[in-house]
Image (cartoon, helix red, strand yellow):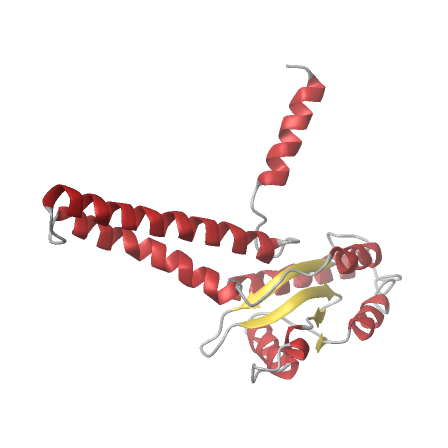
Amino acid sequence: MNAKTQKNREGQKKTKRLPEKGEFLYIDKKKKWQLTISGISIFIVAAICITGIIIYHTQKSIFAVIAALSALPAAKMLVGYLIIMPYHSVNEEIKNHLESICGDKEYCRIVYDVVLSSTDKPMYAGVVFIKNGKIYSYTDHYKNNKKTKLTISDVEKYIKFIVDANCTYSAIKVYDDKEKFFNAVKAEEFSQTGMTDDDIKKMKNMNERIEKQLNIYMF
């Protein structure tokens, strides 16, 4: 196998893998994957039931027990899909704009498709931009969805609750206006200029801690 062929195969494997939490398109691809697996699982459960009825001419057989046990992971997968079904990944325009502003990706953190678990209802923070201990989030979900009683203020308060547990921050703001979000992010473009290496290292660690704290609560 020559180097070019190996590189192409590695590239294909990379594009086929399911994005991890916080990566671009995580929600959209996870929804497709969970719906597909849920459908296959339900089909298998139905097939086991039907097979048992055909063989034993009754629903009371070992096949019914197997089907019942198989239904549990299928139901869990379906519930997982239903939780994230209302939400969508941010578009590529937002991704490209943020990454052009971000600069040093080890210093600035961008977390995509942030759906947070809570004791009440899941909260969708959309995309979260973290820099200099400042947390800016953008989602148009609550502006476009009039049926929900939640607002971006609720999401903002919940992010504060999450981050307060283990991190230090200087600002948290959730936007449903894209231009205002971009302006806030743009203002941080050169914010680390003039900082010492030690200051940058400390802030980089804090940015990472904020990202990890959010990741704990993400679906």
Residue 209 or 85: which is nearer the viewer? 85
User: In the image, is 151 to the left or to the right of 30?
Assistant: right
Residue 7 location in percent, x, y? 68, 26
Compared to residue 217, the image places residue 38 above or below, namely above
Residue 166 or 163: which is nearer the viewer? 163
Q: Residue at x 85, y 63 (%)?
A: 189
| Quarter of the view holding residue 159 | bottom right
User: In the image, is 111 to the left or to the right of 38?
Assistant: right
Residue farthest to the top? 1
Q: Is residue 22 visible?
A: yes
Residue 57 location in percent, x, y? 11, 47
Residue 194 or 157: which is nearer the viewer? 157
| Quarter of the view holding residue 135 | bottom right
Residue 205 location in percent, x, y? 67, 59
Compared to residue 169, the image places residue 66 above or below, namely above
Q: Residue at x 44, y 77 (%)?
A: 119
Q: Quadrant of the N terminus?
A: top right
| Quarter of the view holding residue 157 | bottom right
The number of numbered badges drawn on the structure is 0
Residue 147 location in percent, x, y? 57, 82
Q: Is residue 172 visible?
A: no
Q: Residue at x 58, y 58 (%)?
A: 27
